[in-house]
């Protein structure tokens, strides 16, 4: 409540990709810092998360891409199940915090929306969503990428 005007101030918390918030959580231990996302976190309006770290992967880790519905690392390890479990934890977190919108890193096999790398590790893109994005969308959470901000 905002006294003396009496208006209720409700901030809708967002989840954002931790790499966009400047944290070195990418597979290569780098980040993709985005000023708008960092500003949201600084203002206390967004919580940075990394679905792959939530899934139990460390940083650095082997690059992975989606191929025919499975997420495979560059050396062929199938990490789909582990990422799926991580995505379920992300969804649970979103539900508990009442999150209606997330801002995720484009093209990632976990966070991407609309287009993801095609599984050949050659930089080519195909239509599709990352594992965490797919689950959030199915459960009514709006997903934006940094390019849509
Ligand atoms: Fe960034 Fe998402 Fe990849 Fe984590 S899983 S490094 S948050 S794109």
Image (tube, grey):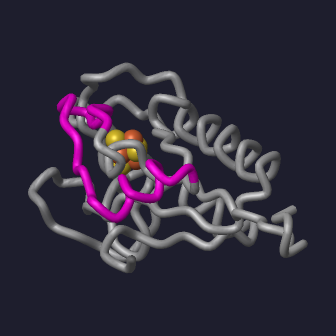
Residue drawn at (36%, 58%) of the image: 105
In this rendered view, identify the residue nearer to me: 17 or 53. 17
Residue placed farthest to the left in the image?
Answer: 122
Residue 97 vs 105, above or below: the answer is above
Q: How many marks?
A: 0
Q: Main secondary structure of the magenta part?
A: loop
Residue drawn at (21%, 36%) of the image: 74
Q: Specify the quadrant of the image occupied by residue 62.
A: top left
Residue drawn at (79%, 57%) of the image: 98
Q: Magenta residues, as a range?
A: 23-44
- Screen quadrant of the N terminus: bottom right
On screen, residue 10 versus residue 40, left or right, reads right
- Screen quadrant of the C terminus: bottom left
In this rendered view, identify the residue nearer to me: 34 or 8. 8
Q: Specify the quadrant of the image occupied by residue 147.
A: bottom left
- Name the spot of residue 77 as percent of width and height, x first: 35, 29
On screen, residue 138 versus residue 106, left or right, reads right
Residue drawn at (19%, 35%) of the image: 30
On screen, residue 50 versus residue 32, left or right, reads right
Residue 28, magenta (yes or no): yes
Ligand 1 picture quarter: top left
Residue 147, magenta (yes or no): no
- Name the spot of residue 37 as percent of width and height, x first: 38, 59
- Name the spot of residue 145 as percent of width and height, x first: 40, 69
Residue 146 vs 92, above or below: the answer is below
């Amino acid at each position: 409540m905002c006294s003396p005007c009496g208006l209720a101030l409700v901030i809708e918390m967002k989840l954002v990709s931790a790499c966009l918030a400047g944290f070195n959580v990418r597979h290569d231990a780098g980040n993709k810092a985005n000023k708008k996302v960092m500003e949201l976190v600084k203002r206390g309006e967004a919580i940075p998360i990394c679905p792959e770290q939530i899934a139990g992967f460390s940083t650095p880790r082997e690059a992975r891409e989606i191929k025919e519905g499975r997420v495979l690392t560059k050396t062929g390890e199938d990490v789909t199940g582990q990422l799926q479990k991580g995505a379920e934890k992300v969804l649970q977190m979103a539900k508990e915090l009442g999150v209606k919108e997330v801002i995720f890193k484009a093209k990632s096999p976990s966070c991407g929306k609309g287009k993801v790398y095609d599984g050949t590790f050659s930089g080519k893109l195909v239509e599709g969503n990352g594992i965490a994005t797919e689950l959030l969308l199915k459960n009514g959470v709006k997903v934006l990428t940094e390019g849509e901000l």
